[in-house]
Structure formats: structure tokens, C-alpha cells
Image: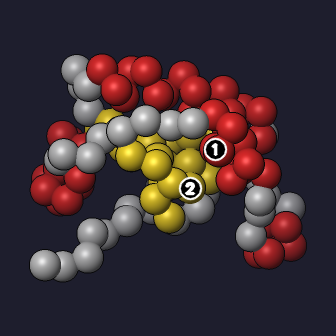
């Protein structure tokens, strides 16, 4: 079994990549929480539908929604606002150095 490929956001200012699909009720519940916490942290969220990319669908088909924060999986299926807020409050050294969110 191979390791799951973690995609990167195409938006360089987005710290959060949100993998979703149309018709996913868990995705619809989690996205407002993710957007609110990202707004609070002063960053953006890139939303990507896994069904528009064959590789993403193959790797993440049963896991949506997936919240990827700074290149690492933060949560799957459900998101806890307080945990996401705490994770967004931590910034990597290179983001502190460059002044990015």
C-alpha cells in the first residue's frame, strides 16, 4: 500500500486546502466552520472538488471532507473549531519570516 499524496494549494496565500465533493453532507457542515476559522486567522481556504481530479478522487474518495493545513492533514470527516483555531494560530518559521498568514 502506498502513502496518500497530500496535495498543495494552488493559491500561495491559502494555508488551508479543503477537499470536498458535491452532495457530501459532512462537507456542507464543515466548510462554514473552516472558512470562519481561516477568516479569524487572516488566511484563505482553497476548496477543491475531488471529483474533478481523477488522482484526488482515487486517493481521497472515502475521506471527504479533508482539511489540509500547511501541507498536513488536520482533519477528516468533521472539524472541531477550537482545534482548527489552535492549529491556525501556530505558524511555521518560514511563514513568520515572510510575514504570510
Above or below — where is 90 with respect to 66? below
How many numbered marks does the figure carry?
2
Q: Position of residue 95 (x, y in %)?
A: 77, 67
Q: Residue at x 66, y 27 (%)?
A: 36
Marks 2 and 1 close (CB-CB < 8 Å): yes
Mark with earlier residue (2, 1): 2
**Residue 20 vs residue 74: left or right?**
left
Q: Residues within 10 Å of mark 1 (few under 14, many from 20)?
A: some
Label 2 sits on residue: 69
Q: Position of residue 23 (x, y in %)?
A: 22, 20
Q: Residue at x 68, y 53 (%)?
A: 87
Q: Position of residue 9 (x, y in %)?
A: 48, 55
**Residue 96 vs residue 19: left or right?**
right
Using the numbered discs, state the Cα–Cα distance from disc 2 to disc 1 in whole angstroms.
9 Å
Above or below — where is 4 with respect to 53? below
**Residue 62 vs residue 95: left or right?**
left
Q: Position of residue 13 (x, y in %)?
A: 65, 52
> What's the mark number on residue 84?
1
Q: Secondary structure at mark 1?
A: helix
30 vs 55, nearest the viewer = 30
Q: Residue at x 36, y 39 (%)?
A: 77
Q: Residues within 10 Å of mark 2 (few under 14, many from 20)?
A: many
**Which marked residue is nearer to the observer: mark 2 or mark 1?**
1
> What's the mark number on residue 2?
none
Quadrant where the image shows the N terminus: bottom left
Above or below — where is 50 with respect to 34? below
Amino acid at each position: 500500500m502506498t502513502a496518500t499524496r497530500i496535495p498543495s494549494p494552488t493559491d500561495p496565500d491559502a494555508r488551508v486546502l479543503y477537499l470536498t465533493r458535491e452532495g457530501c453532507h459532512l462537507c456542507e457542515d464543515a466548510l462554514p466552520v473552516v472558512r470562519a476559522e481561516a477568516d479569524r486567522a487572516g488566511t484563505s481556504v482553497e476548496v477543491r472538488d475531488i471529483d474533478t481530479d481523477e488522482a484526488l478522487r482515487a486517493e481521497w474518495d472515502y475521506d471527504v471532507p479533508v482539511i489540509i493545513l500547511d501541507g498536513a492533514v488536520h482533519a477528516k470527516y468533521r472539524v472541531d473549531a477550537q482545534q482548527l483555531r489552535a492549529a491556525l494560530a501556530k505558524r511555521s518559521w518560514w511563514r513568520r519570516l515572510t510575514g504570510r498568514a
